[in-house]
Amino acid sequence: MKSLPAMVDERIEAALAGLWTSCLGVVTKVDHAKYRVDARPKVKLPDEAGALQELPIVQDVRIAMSHGKNFSLILPVAEGDVGLLVFSKYPLQELVKDSKTRDPALKRRFSVNDCVYVPFTWLDAENAPAHNANDLHIVNTAGDIYLKAKNIRMEKVA
């Protein structure tokens, strides 16, 4: 017979297994018009029989882009890209309406439907571009690079 602490630990682990927080995911589909992706989590979990199963594809996930009142950085996310799937504690559909704060008593919490995809860094199997420590690299091998500003200045630093 298991001890009480072991049984409590087991129950907590079972409850946490269904809690979505964050994990790496692979993009399976991109909707560039809506800035959304479908992504498959990179982890497999055991089913009741102990066989490892892929997790379901998370659909219609917002792509986290750097954006503010006076700037935006839109990244060319593509199928096969790996990124971080971050699951919000509260429903995103309520939180992204505007910049106002919302009632914290929202019913649904930690749902697979409340997810943001954050483009990731290089995987260990990939090679980051060669660069100097103080260099800023902007690379896009799949399309054009657009710079849009009121004025564009380039100055060589002495």
Image (tube, rainbow, N blue to C red):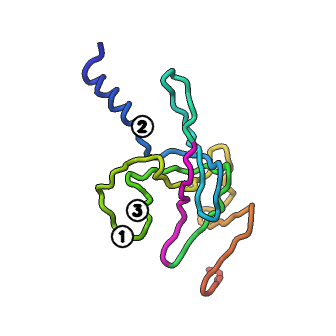
Nearer the observer, 124 or 115: 115
Q: Say which amino acid is labelled 2.
A: Gly
Measuring from the top left, give residue 59's x and y in whole percent: 56, 50
Q: Which residues are magenta?
A: 57-69
* Left or right placement of residue 7 versus residue 53 in this view: left
Q: Residue at x 57, y 53 (%)?
A: 120
Q: Residue at x 71, y 63 (%)?
A: 140
Q: Residues within 10 Å of mark 1 (few under 14, many from 20)?
A: few
Q: Residues within 10 Å of mark 2 (few under 14, many from 20)?
A: few
What secondary structure is found at the residue carrying circle 3? helix
Disc 3 vs disc 1: Cβ atoms closer than 8 Å?
A: no
Residue at mark 3 to residue at mark 1: CA–CA distance:
8 Å
The N terminus: image quadrant: top left
N-terminal-most mark, 2 or 1: 2
Question: Image height check: is 35 above or below 112?
Answer: below
Q: Disc number at residue 46?
A: none
Q: Which residue is mark 3?
A: 95
Q: Disc number at residue 18?
A: 2
Q: Residue at x 57, y 40 (%)?
A: 42
Measuring from the top left, give residue 28's x and y in whole percent: 65, 48
Q: Say which amino acid is labelled 3.
A: Leu
Q: Residue 17's quadrant in the figure? A: top left
For the stretch drawn in magenta, the main secondary structure is strand
Q: Say which amino acid is labelled 1.
A: Lys
Q: Disc number at residue 100?
A: 1
Question: Image height check: is 71 above or below 24?
Answer: below
* Left or right placement of residue 101 versus residue 87 in this view: left
Q: Residue at x 69, y 64 (%)?
A: 139
Q: Is residue 31 visible?
A: yes
* Left or right placement of residue 133 versus residue 143 in this view: left
**Quick one: which residue is furthest to the left in this view?**
4
N-terminal-most mark, 2 or 3: 2
